[in-house]
Image (spheres, rainbow, N blue to C red):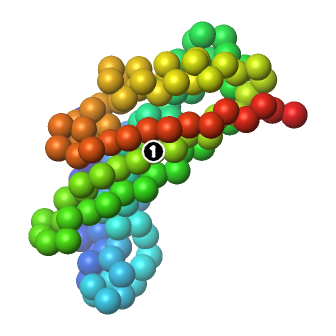
Amino acid sequence: MKVRVKWVEGVSFLAQSESGHSVLMDGPPAGGGRNLGPRPMEMVLMGTAGCSTYDVIHILKKSRADVRDCVVDVEAERAETEPKVFTKIHLHYTVTGKGLKPEQVERAIKLSAEKYCSASIMLAKSVLITHDFEVIEAA
């Protein structure tokens, strides 16, 4: 896997993926940015949540669960001093479907966290990562 990050100006950077997609990252005005895109550390959280959501949906669909939606809200804490690494990350999954069993959802999240999601498994080596979930019955 390869990516390229090119400095645009100030503290703006254009990240380009090997698959042909681009994302503009930028810093806050207080740090010399123009707030034109997510911060690089926000991208780490977004990537982690995206990776896990992909797994959870895939696992639920593979088990023939009637899943209709999945939203993951992530909250993270960072160290106060440089390098300001993440110290805690919490993922809250809201999974909507017809007749979803909480045990199914819990199993899918656990498999993602412990076996499939490369991003969260990698981060868990140095960060406390916790999960919880709620299941909503689809109308």
Left or right position of 46 against 33: right
Q: Position of residue 18 (x, y in %)?
A: 31, 41
Q: Where is residue 78 in the image (x, y as percent from the top left)?
A: 26, 63
Residue at the far right in the pictured view: 139
Q: Where is residue 101 in the image (x, y as percent from the top left)?
A: 66, 19
Q: Where is residue 122 in the image (x, y as percent from the top left)?
A: 22, 36
Give the residue at mark 1: 91
**Label 1, residues with CA under 10 Å away: few <14, some 14-19, many ≥20:** many
Q: In the rendered structure, which amino acid carries the disc numbered 1?
A: Leu
Q: Looking at the image, which residue is at 44% across and 76% down?
A: 36
Residue at the far left in the pictured view: 82
Q: In the figure, 113 relative to 19: above or below?
A: above
* Quadrant the C terminus occupies: top right
Left or right position of 64 against 57: right
Q: In the figure, 15 relative to 109: above or below?
A: below
Pick the front one: 27 or 64:
64
Q: Find residue 76 and report its image quarter.
A: bottom left
Q: Looking at the image, which residue is at 43% across and 56% down?
A: 75
Residue at the far top in the pictured view: 63
Q: Is mark 1 on a helix, strand or loop?
A: strand
